[in-house]
Amino acid sequence: MRRGKRGSSGNEGNDVIGNGNMDKERLKELAEDPRFIQGIYNYCDRWCERCPFTSRCMNFALSEEEFEDPESNDVRNEQFWRKMRETFQLALDLLKDLAEREGIDLDSLDVAESEEEHRARDALAGRHRCSLAAKLYGEMADDWFEAADDLSGRNDEDPTLDGVFGSVEMDPTEGGLGLHDAVEVVRWYQHQIYVKIMRAVRGSLDERQESPDEFPKDSDGSAKVALIGIDRSIAAWREIRERFPAQAHGALDILLHLRRVRKEVEKAFPDARAFLRPGFDRIDLNG
Ligand code: SF4
């Protein structure tokens, strides 16, 4: 699916655009383009189709350039993975250049040890109350959709929209999110909440080893994205519960659990709500 028009300001006439031949120079050029809000993509929900900042996001521009061919947008397609490999390789080359300029010897870093540490922290983060609760939420939501599908007697591969909900009559005059939208919202955030919470917990474990400073914490940013996903999912589940009475009881259990997850995250990350996400919580960090 196309995600909107690629930003064009300052790019006309550039041979690189349109043919997908990204190179180091082009990547650098994009990174320095003042159109883009620095780091906006670090604390977003990756729902580009619904994002009001596509024209201010380097990540979006980059993926539009690299994956503009519909074939290369398909994750099952070999070309997609080749492009991904190329983009990572470019980013690595840029990092090496930067390290060389700053006199840092990347080869001297103990990769084996940091990988081991990384794995240990991952395991620790996975056992955190917030992570466990978020993981359970994802499973509960899956079970709910499966049960809803069974109830309807359908067995579609994708129960999100074309399965059980594809047959529900929509009344365009009704307010609220709408069932279709509510299901989309739930499905979008269902597993992302867990991923963001894991990132927040892992980040907070890293931050404990650093000396305290006055900068906003990355872990709070990730926790805020998770909280926003939870808030939206709660609103969506309320809608689903009202409009799908046959499964209202299960939806209520999920709602109650999700509220508990929210409480846990707010307790573990008390400053998360106040975190200012570039672009979303303030207009522009580029001055
Ligand atoms: S900031 Fe918006 S456009 Fe950029 S990656 Fe996130 S959702 Fe997509």
Image (spheres, grey):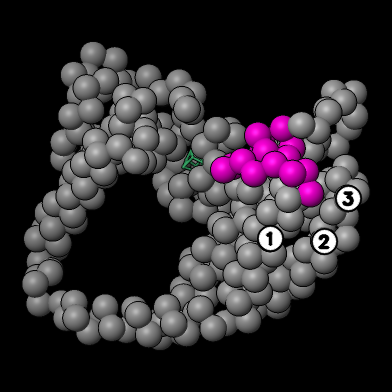
Which label belongs to residue 143? 1
Q: Is residue 77 left or right of residue 6?
A: left
Callouts 1 and 2 close, C-beta under 8 Å: yes
Q: Where does residue 213 sit, x and y in percent of width and height?
A: 47, 76
Sooner in the amino-acid sequence: mark 3 or mark 1: 1
Q: How many marks?
A: 3
Q: Is residue 36 left or right of residue 23?
A: right
Which label belongs to residue 250? 2
Q: CA distance from mark 1 to mark 2?
A: 9 Å
Type of amino acid at the residue the image marks with label 3: Ala
Type of amino acid at the residue the image marks with label 2: Gly
Q: Residue at x 18, y 19 (%)?
A: 15
Q: Residue at x 82, y 58 (%)?
A: 251
Which label belongs to residue 246? 3
Q: Residue at x 63, y 81 (%)?
A: 129
- Residue extending farthest top: 13
